[in-house]
Amino acid sequence: MALINSEQSFVDTNFSALSVTPCSPNIGAEIGLLDLTKPLSNIEVKELRDAFIKYQVIFFRDQKISFEDHIRLAEYFGVLGSHVGKSTISKTTEDPRVRKFHYDENTPRVSGDVFHTDQSCAAVPPLGSILYNHTLPPNGGGDTLFSSMYAAYDALSVRMKVYLQGLTAYHDGVPTFGAGTPNANHPVIVKHPESGKKLIYVNEVFTMKINELSEHESKAILEYLCAHCARPEWTTRFRWKPHSIAFWDNRCTQHMAISDYLPSVRSGYRVQLDGKSPPVAA
């Protein structure tokens, strides 16, 4: 697993308008030379989109952004959406497009502390999310892990890839977010709508069963796949600092928050981008 810090030696020279520093062989890059408090140029937006697709999650440091800045960054990539859950740990703000995430000694639970894909229970899950944290524990902690579902798929044996091809899985949001939260069926192996790459699309939080298998078979395969997707070889670990940003592609990654910092405070804001289409079988 790669640990992300601000001192990396390798810069991706395919980008000219911004600095793109890969964080690990399989996922993640830190973006420099951008001031997100100002509108971006056309070439900056293009290269930022390219980096997002290539690296699956991109990170920014020292960006004291406002709600307006946060929303502007998201709108370079699509349309802002809302959370499908009926009961969530996050709170609304004066701008309904921005949600507040605040954790301290009075927080009943920390959300997202196992690997998951956001709201895969929806018929059209989110394209991605942008999380900005302005306040972090003084002694560290609260890091976020990101895992590449491309790399997880590529590492499967040929026989396992053949076996999983054509299977579908049932995703349900009710156990996590309460009654009225949607459910959906999605292929187990899907194709990313922009990169065209194959990836695994099941996760520990929302995937309840593989439809074509018996209960015992489904349980065994899902346990294997979820453990496989969490392996450190295809993950990277983002060490938060005040005014850092993480922007992940929800279509091809999983992530989890490490809740090792309570009763210290971890606080920030998140916006979510609507998905454009349901996951499609590879």
Image (tube, rainbow, N blue to C red):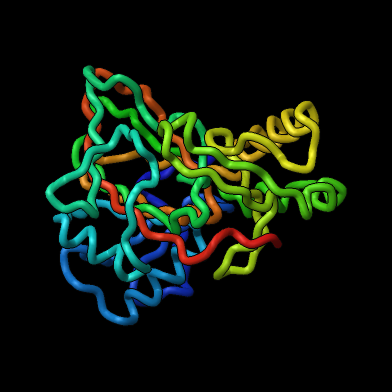
Residue 127 percent location from the top left of the image: 45, 59
Of 179 and 271, nearer the camera is 179
Residue 274 percent location from the top left of the image: 40, 60
Q: Quadrant of residue 178?
A: top left
Q: In this orientation, does residue 111 appear?
A: yes
Residue 197 appears left or right of 159: left
Residue at 84% in and 48% down: 163
Residue at 69% in and 34% down: 222
Of 81 and 231, nearer the camera is 81
Residue at 40% in and 56% down: 58
Image quadrant in which the C terminus is located: bottom right
Q: Is residue 251 above or below residue 136?
A: below
Q: Is residue 42 above or below residue 251?
A: below
Residue 15 percent location from the top left of the image: 42, 74
Image quadrant in which the N terminus is located: top right
Residue 108 percent location from the top left of the image: 30, 19
Identify the residue at the far bottom of this view. Answer: 42
Residue at 60% in and 45% down: 234
Identify the residue at the far right of this view. Answer: 159
Q: Quadrant of residue 280?
A: bottom right
Residue 118 appears left or right of 235: left
Residue 200 appears left or right of 27: right
Residue 158 appears left or right of 153: right
Q: In this orientation, does residue 146 appear?
A: no
Of 198 and 146, nearer the camera is 198
Of 36 and 101, nearer the camera is 101
Q: Is residue 42 above or below residue 20?
A: below
